[in-house]
Amino acid sequence: MPGFDSLWQILVDLFGLAQFGQHSRTGRMKEKESFTSKPFLGVSKASELLGISETTLRRWTDEGRIRVFVTPGGHRRYSVNELRQFMQARRAVQGMSSIASHLEDTAPIHRSTAQIDICAALPNAHLPKESQERLARCGRQLLNLVIQYMVHSAKREETMHLVRQVGQEHGRTLASMGFPLVDSVEAFTKHRNLLVEAAVKFAKKGHMPSERAVSAVPLVTRVLDEALISLVAAHQSHRPSTPGRRTEH
């Protein structure tokens, strides 16, 4: 009759960690000598594969960021395949964080562009400070949400809900100022293009692998398109409280 180690290895080969771990959190396995030949690694080899310290690996494991199998003797074992998937996901997040930081640097350009657009659409208007602050706040929030959407993939649905709210507030604010819908869309599109162009330029400079750069641009456009849809809907549904609002033509 085969020993426990042999039986355990058979189960590992048949089911793998993901499936077998659903039925049992205990077991033992024979360690082999290379990363490529063994399906599981101990703490030392796993941390070496990830390029981090054993302390960091244990902390990430305790935080639930990396899945672990614990043997009857209390030893931690990590799936090589899952470790590699974790490394790929982590590199993707780091790439998104880099491009997000680059987008954040475009904030001054957005502010100056907004001032020019407002002056062109409402040349004789004196904007109340409150309206200026609301527009500035909308711009900052939207930029932050674009970054959040790119970096925190697990919270994208929640982030998109906030994006719609910001878009609605932006649309209501512009409408209450007498800013025509056509000019509102045109101004928003300028900011959208600035962010998309910044993302593309950053990627072309070789700051991140091409496959991640390709995936970054659709994320930016998805957020901004959703914000624009909400802006238009809110602008169209706005009812002016005073007469004399400028009409579109």
Image (spheres, helix red, strand yellow):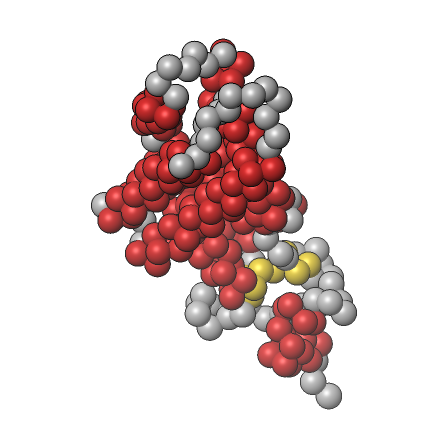
Q: Position of residue 215 (x, y in %)?
A: 40, 55
- The residue shown at (68%, 59%) is 70
The one nearer the camera, 112 or 56, is 112
**Farthest left residue?**
205
Residue at image position (54%, 62%) is 82
Residue sitting at the far bottom? 1
Q: Nearer the viewer, residue 238 or 21?
A: 238
User: Exactly how many numbered labels are in the figure?
Assistant: 0
Q: Residue at x 24, y 49 (%)?
A: 204
In the rendered view, tell whether residue 78 sits above or below residue 199.
below
Where 223 sits versus 171, above or below? below
Q: As drawn, which residue projects farthest toward the right?
A: 23
Q: Residue at x 47, y 22 (%)?
A: 136
Viewer-nearest residue: 43 or 94: 94
Residue 198 visible here: yes
**Place of residue 238 in the rendered image (x, y in percent of width and height, measured from the top left):** 60, 32
- Residue 128 position, x and y percent, is 49, 12
Q: Quadrant of residue 41?
A: bottom right
Left or right: where does residue 205 sit relative to residue 7? Answer: left
For the N terminus, the image quarter is: bottom right
Q: Position of residue 220 (x, y in %)?
A: 42, 46
Q: Is residue 163 visible?
A: no
Please identify the quadrant where the C terminus is shown.
Answer: top left
Figure check: 123 above or below 83: above
Q: Nearer the viewer, residue 192 or 129?
A: 129
